């Protein structure tokens, strides 16, 4: 197993842990908040803010995970109608264009984060610097872009019959 494959497995495990913890924490937080509001007419002051941060993290850090497993939304009508030769071409072009788009979006998000950092904005109840929260977007877009670039590379080097939509052959 190469260094990159080991690093990818490590990243996959870290993403699984972060996503699982985030979903569980968000569920518990929301349930407790609803319970408190219903029975005591009070809620946790920071619940909405923490929920937004967790949701942002789950959404953008989950991009890489779904790209790796090929579980993202895709429009495959044209792809499915093509012969295997043209499918192979599209299996290289689509993740490459997606990767470049996501790299560009991560660049724009990083520029936005630097503007926020210069403004010294903080969240209202927890006083967390807003740029730190928005770094989740940059990290998520960048890792997803890298994952799509990896899928493109695997499709170029894959001599097998099946094209890759994730890091696994289609249909597995």
Image: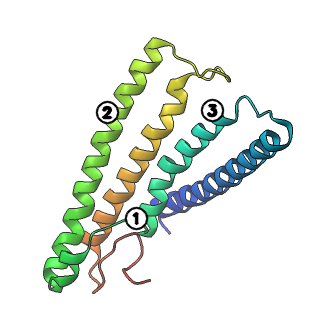
Among the 4 quarters of the image, the one containing residue 67: bottom left
User: Which residue matches tag 2?
Assistant: 108
Residue 18 placed where, x, y %? 63, 51
Ranked by sequence position, the earlier of labels 1 and 2 is: 1
Residue 24 placed where, x, y %? 70, 54
Q: Residue furthest right?
A: 40
Viewer-proximal residue among 157 and 27: 27
When the figure is inspected, residue 73 is found, relative to residue 30, above or below; the finding is: below
* Mark in the foreground, 3 or 1: 3
User: Which residue matches tag 1?
Assistant: 72
Viewer-proximal residue among 94 and 156: 94
Q: Which mark is residue 49?
A: 3
Q: CA distance from mark 3 to mark 1?
A: 27 Å
Residue pictured at 80% horizontal, 46% vertical: 35
Is residue 59 toward the left or the right of residue 153 in the image?
Answer: right
Q: CA distance from mark 1 to mark 2?
A: 22 Å
Among the 4 quarters of the image, the one containing residue 11: bottom right
Callout 3 crowding tier (Cα within 10 Å): few <14, some 14–19, many ≥20: some
* Secondary structure under the numbered disc 1 in the rendered image: loop
* Mark in the foreground, 2 or 3: 3
Residue 63 placed where, x, y %? 45, 54
Residue 95 placed where, x, y %? 27, 61
Is residue 92 toward the left or the right of residue 13 in the image?
Answer: left
> Mark 2 and mark 1 in contact (Cβ < 8 Å)?
no
Residue pictured at 50% horizontal, 39% vertical: 136
Ranked by sequence position, the earlier of labels 2 and 3 is: 3
């Amino acid at each position: 197993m190469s260094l990159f494959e080991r690093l990818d497995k490590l990243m996959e495990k870290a993403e699984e842990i972060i996503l699982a913890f985030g979903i569980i924490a968000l569920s518990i937080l929301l349930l407790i908040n609803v319970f408190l509001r219903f029975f005591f007419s009070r809620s946790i002051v920071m619940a909405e803010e923490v929920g937004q941060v967790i949701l942002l993290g789950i959404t953008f850090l989950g991009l890489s995970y779904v790209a790796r497993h090929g579980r993202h939304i895709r429009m495959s009508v044209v792809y499915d109608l093509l012969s295997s030769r043209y499918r192979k071409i599209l299996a290289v072009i689509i993740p490459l264009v997606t990767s470049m788009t996501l790299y560009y979006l991560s660049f724009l998000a990083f520029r936005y984060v630097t503007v926020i950092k210069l403004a010294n904005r903080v969240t209202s109840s927890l006083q967390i610097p807003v740029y730190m929260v928005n770094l989740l977007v940059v990290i998520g877009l960048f890792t997803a872009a890298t994952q799509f670039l990896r899928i493109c590379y695997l499709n170029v080097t894959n001599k097998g019959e099946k094209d890759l939509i994730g890091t696994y052959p289609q249909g597995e």
